[in-house]
Amino acid sequence: MNLTLEDIGRLAGVSRSTVSRVINDQDSVRLAVRERVQEVIRLTGYTPNAAARSLVSGRTGVIGLVIPSRVHSLFEDPYFSRLIQGISAASNQAGNTLSLFLFQNEEEEAELYPRVITSGFLDGLILTATRMADPLLARTAVGEIPIVVVGRPDVEGVSYVDVDNRGGALKAATHLSSLGYQRIGLLGAPVSTTAGLDRLNGFVEGLAACGLPLPPDLRVDGDFSEASGYVAMRKLLAHQPDAVFAASDTMALGALRALKEAGIRVPQDMALVGFDGLPGSENSVPSITTIRQPVTETGARAVHILNDLVTGVATAPIVEIMPVELVIRESSGTSRDSAGSDVE
Amino acid sequence: MNLTLEDIGRLAGVSRSTVSRVINDQDSVRLAVRERVQEVIRLTGYTPNAAARSLVSGRTGVIGLVIPSRVHSLFEDPYFSRLIQGISAASNQAGNTLSLFLFQNEEEEAELYPRVITSGFLDGLILTATRMADPLLARTAVGEIPIVVVGRPDVEGVSYVDVDNRGGALKAATHLSSLGYQRIGLLGAPVSTTAGLDRLNGFVEGLAACGLPLPPDLRVDGDFSEASGYVAMRKLLAHQPDAVFAASDTMALGALRALKEAGIRVPQDMALVGFDGLPGSENSVPSITTIRQPVTETGARAVHILNDLVTGVATAPIVEIMPVELVIRESSGTSRDSAGSDVE
DNA sequence: CTGAAAGCGCTAACAC
DNA sequence: GTGTTAGCGCTTTCAG
């Protein structure tokens, strides 16, 4: 339709201002007039021109979702999949349009990012999977448009939403300790990520609170992948832990595979706790105890915070830590003392 | 930056028209002037305002990617993951911005879609995973903006890019037949999808060309999922096929699991061919022979066709069928005659 | 080759 | 309550 406000106004016998008022839900329009205008709009299928609208309002209703180059392999990761869905759903509901920026490589990142951030095309930006010393975050300091990071960034003064990685890992440690396990190992996530770092620290803290150490040989780090969990678990086995906390469910799945191969029964011979609570961890045999994080809600919070920033309701930086939850399943379903007997 | 063309012009000592010409790469600007302007633009970091630009040009450079509600579970499907990456990469390269429309449910679809299509915010639309009698496609008939469908739609007059499902399934059939197999079963995809239908028809056609039938009891349909492949394979086993073509690699993986459980060796006791060629099929044990489809390229073609439609270079409907390729791996790595001996 | 001027469709004072 | 008017920042004739 190439209809304009003027056209609708003519059809309804009013001026374009009145039509504009009706469209923007302003109260100062007589009911009869309002209804007449709405009827014309309905009949014609008129939709306001987005460009003209944002030219004058300075807002587009579009928010950008940036996924940096290095995460492409992670794109089919259920975590990202759900995060994107959460962001998309919240964005739809808030009346925003979502633009996706999947940078293929650093050059593309460097070339596109500045334009994206200054063209006025976006009201704000959600940044995911930032790394330590992320160049995107650095460039952002210029402060063009509001930005919300998902996950804790390693710089100050940035709004972000994160899950309680520290608290979750702490829960995992005390849970295993409370079951009577003594040699509790860690299958860590990369400490080059803040999530990995926070989970490590929380875990150590939790152990310490129970009077337990984390000997260096009881910690092997992976990279979130199933394969890395498998490899790390095999290394860990040499040092005979009686329980293991894997910093992601995917790694826990890899660990489980290694344990099966080694003929070690879970949970009878070794307890296992993962992190994330994504689908998959509950369907394994045995099902895996995990720290469930609210991925979809995290995405939604990011959208809402961003909108608050955009509308000026809030002023940066805003930080929100989403709670996590210990979900006890078969892989730690029994206390150390009763280990050896089957789980019902 | 709140700089405008006027500002840049003043700084460079020219009018805003000249600056506009420089930005839009029009030749009619003296070299010296052009360079002076470019220098100012570089120094100030000026970026043209997208809204103003598209208000006058009628174009936004934004293309939409629509993924209907029912596919959410499929979002972490490697197929979609790669398709989106292909579309995103091509879109970045073509200077487009990609907007993602993930509809959560039919209502959202019905509410948002008309607005999306008429707000002038999008230059064009790529539609994925359309179903038979898709309401989106129906609404599209109004013909607001150019649309390209990925996958064969079930209506006429729509531009689309598809892979050669028919030809691929045909190759699978003749491949298995050439190896000497006689009772070749089908683990089909839903015939409520054009891909499932085309793969079925191609397969039957291929068998027929080799003088083989497809008895009804040698065909069980799944829904693309691993679990459905597992279930369907178990049903199929009762009728003792000596080879099976699964209409997707994921289903082939499920079938493989069922075969392992049943103690049936692949390829010694039964040959298996999948479809898609996505990562995962090559890492299974045994690795699975498959029909590889060029997912990334398919996405890229969709973007290019859409841009041709948008710029008027082409006029709808444009149809393009991407070639597929038989990739022979372990699961069919031997001829029927030598079956029973190990594959080297 | 370059500048002046006229809008693109909309919102938001400002009148009436 | 409603209409009039003046731009938002840009592209594009049209002059010169």
Image (tube, coloured by chain):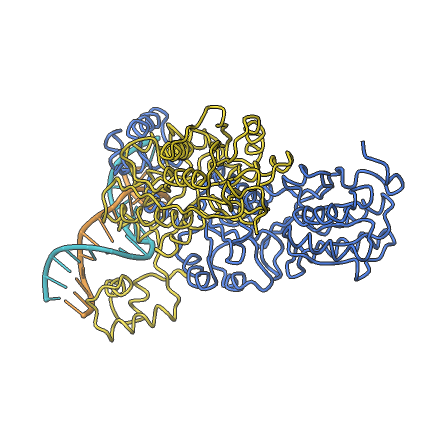
Chain colours: A blue, B yellow, C orange, D cyan
The x, y position of residue B304, in whole percent, is 32, 50
Say left or right for A44 vs A29: left
Q: Would you say B78 lies left or right of B145 here?
A: right
Q: Quadrant of residue B202?
A: top left
In the displayed structure, A140 sits above or below A29; it is: below
Count of numbered labels shown in the rendering: 0
Between B223 and D6, the residue placed more toward the observer is: B223
| Residue C2 vs residue A101, the one in the foreground | A101
Which residue: 53% across, 37% down?
B251
- Viewport quadrant of the N terminus of chain B: bottom left
Answer with left or right where residue B2 lies relative to residue B226.
left
**Visible in this render: residue A25?**
no
Residue B24 against residue B62 in the figure, above or below: below
Viewer-closest of B13 and A106: A106
Farthest residue, direction bottom: B32
| Furthest residue in direction right, as rendered | A337
Report x, y in % for residue A96: 45, 42
| Residue B268: quadrant of the picture | top right
Identity of the residue furthest to the front in this view: B337
Q: Is any part of residue B168 visible from this angle?
A: yes
x and y, in percent, of residue A53 in the image: 35, 45
Percent across and percent down for residue B280 are: 55, 47
